[in-house]
Image (cartoon, rainbow, N blue to C red):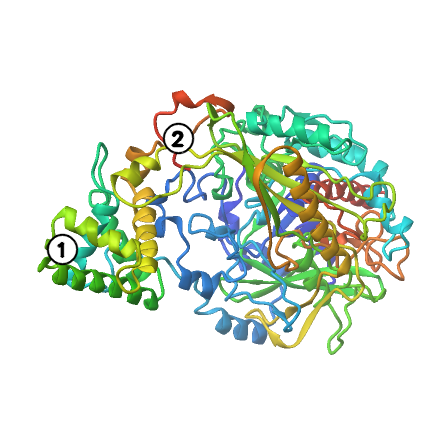
Amino acid sequence: MIIDRRTALAGVAAMFGAGAFAPIARAAATAAQTKGAVIPGISEGPPSVAVFTPAQRALLTALSERVIPTTDTPGAIAAGVPQYIEKLLADWSYTKEREPVIAGLDAIDKRSMADFKVAGAKATAKQQDALLTLAMNGQIPGGKDWFEAFRQLVITGYYTSEIGITQEREYLPVPGEYNGAFPYSQVNKVYSS
Amino acid sequence: MQTASTNRFDAIVIGSGISGGYAAKELTEKGLKVLMLDRGVMVEHSEGYDYEGKPAFEVPARNRMPEPLRDSDYFIAKHGYVAPSSRKFYNDDRLNPYAYDEGSKFYWIRPGAVGGKSLIWGRWSFRWAEEDFTANKREGIDGVWPIGYDDLAPWYSTVEKYIGVSGSRENLPYLPDSEFMPPMPMNVAEKWLKQRLESKFPGRKLINTRLSNITVDKPEQNRTKCQHRNQCGNGCSFGAYFSTQAVTLPAARATGRLTLQSDAVVTNLEYDSKAKRVTGVRYIDAKTGQAQVVNANLVFLCASAMGSVQVLMNSRAPGSEKSWFDNSGTLGRYVMDHIFRVGVSGEIPGMTDLIEYGRRPGGVYIPRFRNIGGEEGVGFKRGYGYQGSASRSPMPPVGFGAEMKHGMRKYAPWRFDMGAFGECLPYKDNRVSLHASKVDRFGVPLMKFDVTFRENELKMMADAKAQGEAMLKAAGLTNVTSGESEHVPGDAIHEMGGARMGADPRNSVLNGFSQAHDAPNLYITDGAQMASVSCVNPSLTFMALTARAADHAVKQMRA
């Protein structure tokens, strides 16, 4: 295959030689305008700012695992869900998205102190489940909305993680064929999309 | 640039998408030396598909477009089209903006890479019917086509055999069959629905999709049949769907007569008004800001419907507001898109012992059934078709904890979802123009859109909603619901018109061979040429028109 890449990359002046015509003033002005015309990247690596205090982070981590616990497959902590949530709120969302998440964590923590005399992160799994249930049922101020949003963050983080995609679910990189009447009894795990 | 003897190229093709890529293949194969210009970045087949086959955890931001980035740079393409894995293929709307006045919102969703929309298209491929070419004339609507189905049928056949279209032979009067590869199969729930829907509504059909994903290998093109990944929008190294990269670009390169220049933003055409010929193509290198004028005896303008119209409108004498190519006064007018955003869905009972294996691109199609052959008194002209599919999703979360996690390991019952695509009529005052004061970073006046859907289109969508519900309910689906959201022209990314074909140079820009009335060495073979839009997906028709135009152009050159 003839790929004319070298020519394409060599630049237009070399390419078209004397046949080319360049209105210099216009080109200079345009060059100035195209400078800085950069498509932004998407931040990767650790969060660029700490969204949570250590106590909030500990509670977030514990509650993530209560939403998707380790069972016969790894849970939210092993799947890196707490780190995903902090990265999402630090670098992939508007800063205003952080506030309700943090407020909900603080409300849970407060309720934990009141009910169990212990910080939420230090509560037992059973106590943490009770706190999440209160939130889910709207018995903590702002709880219902917070619960829905928090659960969705955990679910998104988990089912887009390597563990979620390849262990909890089954990923078929190249199915190769399509069967529109495949026996459900032969499905071992839900297929990742 | 009047010195033809310095020409390095016989032809210049502007744009490298569905139409431009096809034009470059045809012209190079006919022996012409071709320069193909594209304003987008270079993407090579396979090696340029950065996130092909990668699951979400290997894509930035888990392949969810960060909201601030979406709002700042991809605000036009935010309706589900653009993701981190595919964004290289899309225009950056902040760097390359356009304009509209309050009250005439338009989504101009553009690609940003060589290959244009061929990399990211929906791939549904249908022939137009004779009905589509004759309706304007029959109904007395401005925009009589100078060609009919018979003019295009042999070119459809040529294109279909070349690109590969999968589908089922149906012998329908409204939707002519293509040269098909075997269809993407229906799943068991779609077959069930087909049988019940067709028996309850005689004359209405539910058929296999017609898709440019191939179901038989094409070794002569180094293409492997669809592997059912359904990740087409990230690029496909199997070459299983038609794209410039997979099909027409390798063919054009194989001739040794193609030069491809990416990052080349065409601003205008230069014109000799005495000779009535295009004499040059001016473009700016987006990387350096340097302007160039190149010339050739033949120019194919395939910069996308609205992109081509913008180039034409910006081609004018110094100080003049009137394009060289607008002696008819119709340039920029009769802009159309398919109207959509009506969805209907429901649950299909039973068959829960069966499920899909593999991820099939496409789905099923309910072809147009309204007003075929004449108005039926349903309150609007023309019609719509539905694109849909049946599938089973994982169960939604309930509560939290182990019970929720394990509950999500089961699949819900079968659901069927479909959306309607309707024909928009051509209206003279649905138009685009160059902005009076704002220019882009290349000095080109912004495109300004003044396009709205009218009563006919909105009535059609109301009917599509009602009929969709009625059909799914009668077929025995449960919990049938429908939804309708804002209808914004451009949203279907089937924008067409603006430089329409016609027999009369006084009311059209192009003749029946896609050739400019005002410049016989200029052909415009993308969506700009369309005088009406049918209700079926348009790309296959652009390719057939392009192949036909290339044949005409080369014959004229050599006559």
- Element type where label 2 sits in the image: loop
Per the image, the residue denoted by label 1 is: A121
The crowd level at tag 2 (other Cα within 10 Å; few <14, some 14-19, many 20+) is some
The crowd level at tag 1 (other Cα within 10 Å; few <14, some 14-19, many 20+) is many
Task: Tell me which chain the residue with mark 1 is part of.
Answer: A
- Looking at the image, residue B329 lies above or below residue B264: below
Per the image, the residue denoted by label 2 is: A172
The front one of A79 and A147 is: A147
Q: Position of residue A14 (x, y in %)?
A: 53, 56
Q: CA distance from mark 1 to mark 2?
A: 37 Å
Horizontal side of A63 relative to B367 (left or right) equals left
Q: Which of label 1 and label 2 is nearer to you?
A: 1
- Looking at the image, residue B20 lies above or below residue B322: above
The front one of B392 and B50 is: B392
- Element type where label 1 sits in the image: helix
Task: Tell me which chain the residue with mark 2 is part of.
Answer: A
Q: Amino acid at mark 2?
A: Leu
Q: Earlier in the sequence, mark 1 or mark 2?
A: 1
